[in-house]
Amino acid sequence: MRHAIRGSAISFKDNPFAKPVSECLVYEEDAIVVIDDGKIVAFGPATDIQPTLAKDIPVTRYTDALIMPGFIDCHVHYPQTEIIGAYGKQLLDWLNKYTFVAEQTFRDKDHASEVARVFLRECLRAGTTTATVFCTVDPTSVDAFFEKSQKLNMRNIAGKVLMDRNAPEALTDTPQSGYDQTKELIKRWHGNGRQLYCVTPRFAPTSTPEQMEMTGAVWQEHPGTYLQSHVSENKGEIEWVKELYPDCDG
Ligand SMILES: [Zn+2]
């Protein structure tokens, strides 16, 4: 069904990472956006668009608002929804005390689905329409997430965390099982509707060099998939990573 919205709007006509923002940002004081069956088919100043609209197209007017594209969150962990704000002195303490405890509950599909539902609802409430998301080590957590995302027709990028050391037994895989599960999830979800897969080694301390090798391999075997991880976030972690990967440049 065709409908339109009218109000102040911003959009981008070019890539602000490659060009000055002033050359990319478009601001219209009074714009009309025309949407047909969920897709934007026209956008511009109301004076240009208005005459092209059929008389019976409903136009919703927003007078005290700014119409803008959906936000994209480049890094977020949906299994941490329940522990937002949990106090931790440093990353490593925080992981052991809260995160790794919370993540163990995502083997239960019902629980994972409920947290995914709340997480995605909160994303949309904040105007975030796409996110790059860490799930947990359990493939169930990925299925639960993508099923909910698919239902909402959101475009999300997510993946199963790969961890084969320095984490609780219940949260570890092996280089082989991590590889196999990732491959299976890519087959099931990458390009399924608007869902996209992201190969997800958590960070250097929780993957052996062997797992890193296999992670690189599965990513290269599937062009078009994404890759996410973490760089070191504090000094204690940097020292630890240096010990674990002595051959790498500090
Ligand atoms: Zn993170």
Image (spheres, grey):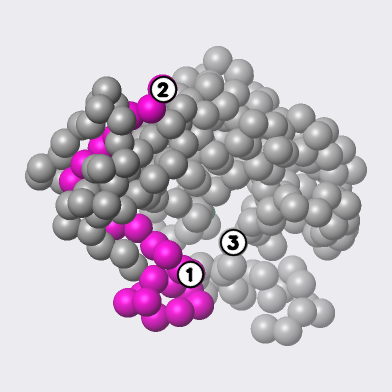
Front-lying residue, 202 or 24: 24
With respect to residue 243, does 27 lie above or below? above
Q: Is residue 19 magenta?
A: yes
With respect to residue 247, does 141 lie above or below? above
Which disc number belongs to residue 214? none
Q: Residue furthest left?
A: 64
Q: Are marks 3 and 2 in contact (CB under 8 Å)?
A: no
Region of the chain picked out in magenta, as a range: 1-24
**Residue at figure coordinates x 44%, y 41% from the top left:** 41
Q: Amino acid at mark 3?
A: His
Return the x and y of residue 16 as percentages of the image width and height.
Answer: 43, 72
* Mark whose residue sits in front, 2 or 1: 2
User: How far, Cα to Cα, is label 2 from label 1?
Assistant: 31 Å
Q: Is disc 1 surrounded by few (<14), some (14 to 19) or many (20+) residues within 10 Å?
A: few
Return the x and y of residue 138 as percentages of the image width and height.
Answer: 69, 32
Q: Is residue 118 left or right of residue 246?
A: left
The CB of the residue at mark 3 lies under 8 Å from ligand 1: yes
Q: Amino acid at mark 1?
A: Asn
**Residue at figure coordinates x 67%, y 83% from the top left:** 250
**Callout 1 secondary element:** loop
Q: Are marks 3 and 1 in contact (CB under 8 Å)?
A: no
Q: Which residue is mark 1?
A: 15
Q: Is residue 126 left or right of residue 156?
A: left
Which disc number belongs to residue 1? 2
